[in-house]
Image (spheres, rainbow, N blue to C red):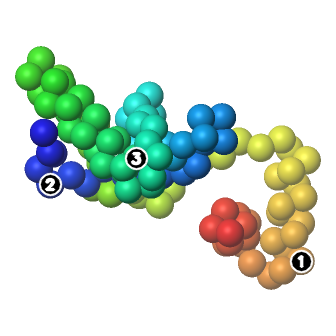
Amino acid sequence: MALKDDRYTYRVTWSEDDQEYVGLCAEFPSLSWLAPTPEAALKGIRKVVADVVHDMREHGEEPPEPIASRRYSGKFMVRVPPEVHRDLALKAAEAGVSLNRLASVKLSH
């Protein structure tokens, strides 16, 4: 069964342990699908996700919202040791930018 309007986030990678490609879905981290080709791994994980979503809906459960559909504020809090905070504040001052700007640049690389 195919999932109508499938907007989930998929990834295919090589599994050295299994000597096959593994299909993964970010919204369903416990699911995976092994296959000899990347195309088959993607097809397999998409079918597994479709089956799980169908089963969840049949049992009155709400499947997770696709990451691509979620709204993000652009804000989140990170806790770091005081020494790291001090070091980053110093680097930001030396660069003539705000601590927020420095952290944003570092996180986006």
Q: Within the image, what quadrant is residue 35 found in?
A: top left
Judge whether residue 11 can be spotted in this image.
no
Distance, label 2 to label 1, CA atoms, is 49 Å
Viewer-closest of 58 and 31: 31
Residue carrying label 2: 5
Q: Earlier in the sequence, mark 2 or mark 3?
A: 2
Q: Secondary structure at mark 1?
A: helix
Q: Residue most toward the front?
A: 36
Q: Residue at x 47, y 46 (%)?
A: 36
Expressed as whole percent of the image width and height from the top left, the position of residue 91 reads 87, 69
Q: Amino acid at mark 2?
A: Asp
Please say if the residues under marks 2 and 3 sit with CB atoms less than 8 Å apart: no
Secondary structure beneath dot 2 equals loop
Q: Are marks 3 and 1 in contact (CB under 8 Å)?
A: no
Where 30 falls versus 69 (above or below)? Answer: above
In this rendering, the label closer to the viewer, 3 or 1: 3
Q: Amino acid at mark 1?
A: Glu
On the rendered structure, is 20 left or right of 84? left
Residue 101 found in image quarter: bottom right
Q: Nearer the observer, disc 2 or disc 3? A: 3
On the image, the x and y values in percent for residue 73 come to 41, 58
Residue receiving disc 1? 94
> Where does the C terminus fall, quadrant-wise?
bottom right
